[in-house]
Image: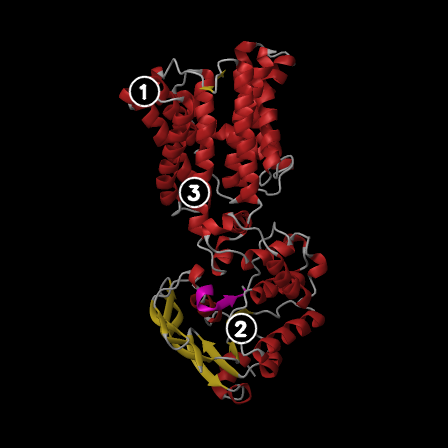
Amino acid sequence: MEYLIHLAILFAIYAILGVSLNLVVGYAGLLSVTHAAFYGVGAYTTAIFLTKSGVGFFSSLILGIAIAVAVSFLIGVVLSKFKGDYYALGTFGFNAIIFAVFLNWQNLTNGSLGVPGISRPELFGINFANNFNFLILALIFFVLVYFASRFIVNSSFGRVLKAIREDETAIAVFGYKTLSFKLVVFIISAAMAAVAGSLFASYITFIDPSSFQLTESMFILAIIILGGLGNLRGSILGALFLILLPEILRFVGFSSDIDAQMRQVVYGIILILLMLYRPQGLIGEYKL
Amino acid sequence: MKIIETKNLAKRFNGVHAVDRLSIEVEKGQITGIIGPNGSGKTTLINLLSGVLEMDSGEIIVDGAKKITRILPHQVSFYGITRTFQNVRLFEQMTVLDNILVVVTERNVFSSLFEKHTEYHHKIAEEVLQKVGLWEKKNQLAVNLSYGQRKLLEIARTLAMRAEVYLFDEPFAGLFPEMRKIVSSIIQGLRQKNKTVVLIEHDIGLIRELCDHIFVMDEGKLLAEGKPESVLKKREVIEAYLGE
C-alpha cells in the first residue's frame, strides 16, 4: 500500500509538470526543454528555506513560485528572440545553465552533495510526514494546477495561444502582441513547475542537481508527447503511463539492475513509434 | 480623401529592389487594384503596409495624419488595416468558428485570461460565416476545408475585424465561379459601406469590373495609374504586363 501511495505521489507531481509544460508546448507551440530547471528552482527554494531558515513549507512554496516567475521572466524575454528549432536550442541552453548553478553554487545548494533533511509540511495540525496525508496534499495541488490550466486554455487567452502555435505572423496582424502572450504562458508554466518542485523536495526530503538535468526535461516532454499535445488530460495520461512504466517493466521480468537503463530504452522506443505512427500522441490535438 | 499614402517606400532583398521608392495614394471608400507581372512587388507592398515586412526607407501615411516609418504586425489593426495572404494562412488546427472568434476577442494579454467569448462575439462570427457560406461548417477544423472554403474563411476573418482598409492578396485565385461571386459581392459591399479595398488580382476582367482606380507595378516601381479603362490601354502597360 505504501508503495502505491508513493507512486500516486510521483504521479501527481509529474502530472503537474506535464499539464504545465503542455501549456507552453501543446498550446503555444513553443518546444521548451527547460521545464526541469523551473522544477529545480521550486525544489531548491523550498529545500534551502526549509533547512536554513525558519520559514514553513507553504511560505517556501510561495517563495519558490516567486523566484521561478522572476527567473522565467528573464529567460522568457531572451527566448522571445527565438523561433522554432532555435527556441528549443535556447531552452536547452537555459536548462544547462540552471543545472550548472545548482551544481556549482556550493554555499547555497551544497553542490553535488545535495540538500538533505528537508522537512515535510505541517498545516492546521495535519502532519504531512504521513505519506497518505502527503498524497492528499499533492493531489490538491494537482487539481488546482489542472483547473487553473483548464481555465487558461478555455479563455480567449488560450485561443490566442493556439493561434500563435498555428501561425504567429497571421495572428499578430490581427492586433496581438504575441511576445507578451508567449512570455506570460511561459511564466505561468514555470510557476506551476515550481509547485511540483516544492512538493518533490519536501516529499523526498533530499534533493541534488541530478534530478533537474536536461534528461528530466526530456522526460517531462515525453509525458506530454505521449499523452497528447494540446490536451490537458493527455498530460495526465502520459504521466500515469510513464510513472507506471518501470513497474510494468519489472512485472515483465527486467531485474532491478537494468531496470533504469531499460526504462530509458523503452522511453526512446515509445517516442520513435509515436512520431512514426501517432505524432499527436494518445489523445492529442496537435502534432509537433 | 486619401486613407493610405506611401512616400518613397522601399524594400530590397539581397540587393534586389522589390519595392523601389514607391509613392502612391489610396482613396478612401474605393476599390484600388494593384496589377503587375509576377515579382513586380505587389505582395511585398501589401506586406510592407501590414507590417509583415519592415520597410528599408520611406514612409506610410494613414488617414493623412499618422506618419509611420516602422510598423509592427500587431500595430496594423490599430491603424484600421486588415489583410488576407496570397498563400492562405489559417489557424489550421482550430475550428472554423475559433478562426473567427480569435480575431474579435480581447487583445490585452491579462484581460484575455479572464474573458471567454460572449454572445456578441458569437454573433459577429455567425454574421461573417453566413456571408461566406461557412456557418454550417463552424465546428470543422480549418485544415479539413477545401481550398476555396479556406480562402473564403480567410476573407470572413478580415470582415470580422470591421476594419477601414482591406488588403486582399489574390482573393479570387483558385475559386469556383460561385465562390468568385461571393467574394465579388463582399468586395462591392465593402465599397458601399465606404470601406477601402486594395486588391491584388491577375484577372483583368475582375479588375475592370470592380476597381475604381488601379496601380500597375513593374520591378518594384509604379508603371502607371488611373482608371482601369484608360490605364489598361496604355502601351507600356500592355508591353510590360498584358503582353498583347
Disc 3 vs disc 1: Cβ atoms closer than 8 Å?
no
Residues behind callouts 2 and 1 on a single chain: no
User: What chain does badge 1 belong to?
Assistant: A
Element type at mark 2: strand
User: What chain does badge 2 belong to?
Assistant: B
Q: Amino acid at mark 1?
A: Ser
Q: Quadrant of residue A61?
A: top left
| Left or right placement of residue B137 versus residue B68 in this view | right
Q: For mark 3, what is the residue? A: A87
Quadrant of the snapshot with the C terminus of chain B: bottom right
Q: In this picture, is A84 found above or below A63?
A: below
| Left or right placement of residue A270 versus residue B167 in this view | right
Q: For mark 1, what is the residue? A: A53
Q: Amino acid at mark 3?
A: Tyr
Residues behind callouts 3 and 1 on a single chain: yes
Relative depth, front residue between A52 and A56: A56
Which class describes the residues within 10 Å of circle 2: few (<14), some (14-19), or many (20+)?
many
Q: For mark 2, what is the residue? A: B200
Q: In this picture, is A270 found above or below B136?
A: above
Residue A108 part of the magenta segment: no
